[in-house]
Image (cartoon, rainbow, N blue to C red):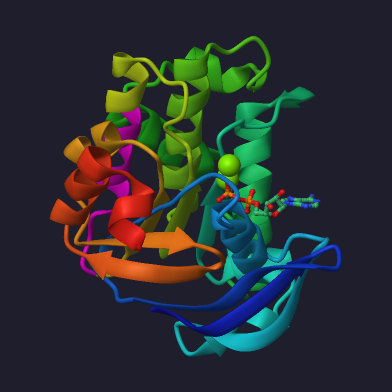
Amino acid sequence: MLKIENLHANVGDKPILKGLNLNINAGEIHAIMGPNGAGKSTLAYTIGGRDGYDVTGGAVDFDGEDLLSLDPHERAAAGLFLGFQYPVEIPGVSNLQFLRESLNAQKRARGEDELSGAEFIRLAKEKAAMLKMDMEMLKRPVNVGFSGGEKKRNEMVQMGIIDPKIAILDETDSGLDIDALRIVGEGINNIMRRPDKAVLLITHYQRLLDLVKPDFVHVLAGGKIVRSGGAELALELEEYGYEEVAA
Ligand code: ADP
Ligand code: MG
Ligand code: MG
């Protein structure tokens, strides 16, 4: 589904990704771990197509398409979802408006029919119920005044409504308490653990991986994947540290 080959990327004029290779098939959950400054967020932003992250070499194939030739909104419409540590607040725009417009923009880009107001509300109710989110919260401005856990639940509802093919979640578990962490873990499992979907979790912590068991764990250091293994590699990292394990 996502095939990253020899990816090189600069932030400004500083080379950060230096020949990164990664293959993610449908049905797989991958975790990337690695020391601070290794380039994990740079990888997520580069895949997302964020301004200021310039690809200087390599290729990324997403479901048969040349991902790097697509605009960020085309990447989203093609089924790429990015989640970050700090969800944005959007005063003056309700969650429901925001989600409906996001979904319909993607549908337009794919040449599909938009959902009517009634169809959208039905979908939103279904996803909110699945993620135990109060519909009243969805009427409030996006993330404004939400607790950390509420923002995460909201992000999971968003992911459920958008229904992406692949989700890349960058330290979405950082700073969460146990309850919020469980919301995220259950959200990922409920929405994304399917034969036709894939997940890339970027995390420092085993505790998320206890809830969402990865099929593969990779260590990113110095702008490349330096080691790959199964779920047990995360435990090894926790016990021995990056330097020991990645050396
Ligand atoms: P990680 O997520 O693994 O902690 P990052 O991808 O955030 O690492 O950062 C990788 C490197 O890129 C670091 O050396 C960091 O200082 C640098 N970097 C990240 N963002 C910027 C930026 N906007 N401007 C300049 N340097 C940056
Ligand atoms: Mg960091
Ligand atoms: Mg980071």
Q: In the image, is residue 60 above or below residue 202?
A: below
The residue lying toward the viewer, choosing from 67 and 85, is 85
Q: Residue at x 75, y 69 (%)?
A: 10
Q: Is residue 189 magenta?
A: yes
- Give percent across and percent down for residue 70: 70, 78
The part of the image, by quadrant, that contains residue 126 is top left
Q: Which residues are magenta?
A: 183-195
The answer to whether one can see residue 125 in this image is yes
Observer able to see residue 164: no
Q: Identify which residue is drawn at 59% across, 80% down.
A: 7
Report the front residue among 46 and 166: 46
**Of all residues shown, which one is farthest toward the left?**
232
Residue 199 falls inside the magenta stretch: no
Judge left or right: residue 22 versus residue 217: right
- SS majority, magenta: helix
The quarter of the displayed image where residue 139 is located: top right
